[in-house]
Amino acid sequence: MKNTLPLPGKTGLHIAFTGIDGAGKTTQAGKLAFHIKQKYGPTYLAEPRTDLVSQMLHVLAWKHGQTSRREYFGDHIVDFSKAFDVVRDYYSTVAPLLASGMHVVEPRSIFCRIAMAFAMNGARDKKTEQVLSVIPKPNLLFWVDTNPSVALARIQRRGIDTEKLEDLRRFSRAYHKMPESADWVQIQGDKAQKTLEKEIRRHVDDLFAKQ
């Protein structure tokens, strides 16, 4: 087990996840961050946070009698605006940690935003993607490809939020239409969490072995 400070001049590895809601991204990211910390050194789990733009859009929609920010502002404005918060979070938090030599694991990647925009608009949102493109690609990106029905059952069990099956299906179809997915590590998310954990660890250990 390694328990050292980040090495000066050595850039950390950036590992991220993508997939529909209920795929198990957050669960697997947490387990992976612990594994990397124990085996390879200091690691930061970059948990998603409620951003300023998201809060402002909600507040403004409510002030005008709408419960949905997307219904009030439209999909493009919501996705385009939130993209700037994603960029800010990367360069204010993730990039400095990587530069210091710390490894970073993100439960969500920019491709979650891109796929969501694709699913909601029915077409690629080029301007939103241009904003997000200023963020470098991670060293390793896991696509947890999960059956929407399985994902919905997980969401219902955790009882924190709600999703519609048709929305999850649209989200899933968007991922499968994205040519970028050919460069990702596709993991079948319907498997037991322990099986997923072992498969993900194998890919990550291979990555570190090549460094």
Image (cartoon, rainbow, N blue to C red):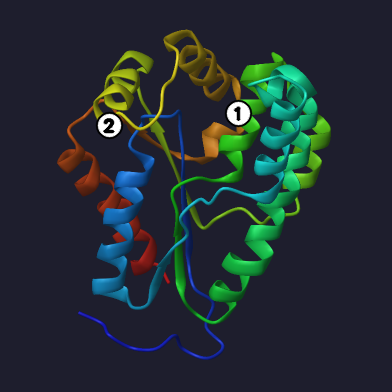
CA distance separating discs 2 and 1: 23 Å
Q: Residue at x 52, y 91 (%)?
A: 8
Q: Three-letter amino acid code at disc 1? A: Ala
| Quadrant of the image occupied by residue 113 | top right
* Contact? badges 2 and 1 (CB < 8 Å): no
Q: Dividing the picture into quarters, in which one does residue 11 lie?
A: bottom right
- Badge 1 is on which residue? 115
- From the viewer's side, name the closer residue of 116 and 164: 164
**Residue at point 57% right, 66% down?**
94
* Left or right placement of residue 28 versus residue 138 in this view: left
Task: Tell which of 157 and 199 is nearer to you.
Answer: 157
Residue 135 percent location from the top left of the image: 69, 55
Which residue is outermost to the right?
127
Q: Quadrant of the N terminus?
A: bottom left
| 190 lies above or below 54 | above
- Image coordinates of residue 30 in percent, x first then y, are 32, 55
Q: Which residue is the site of mark 2?
A: 158
Left or right of 9, for residue 147: left
Among the two numbered marks 2 and 1 on one chain, the one whose residue lies closer to the N terminus: 1
Mark 2 neighbour density, 10 Å: few (under 14) some (14–19) many (20 or more): few
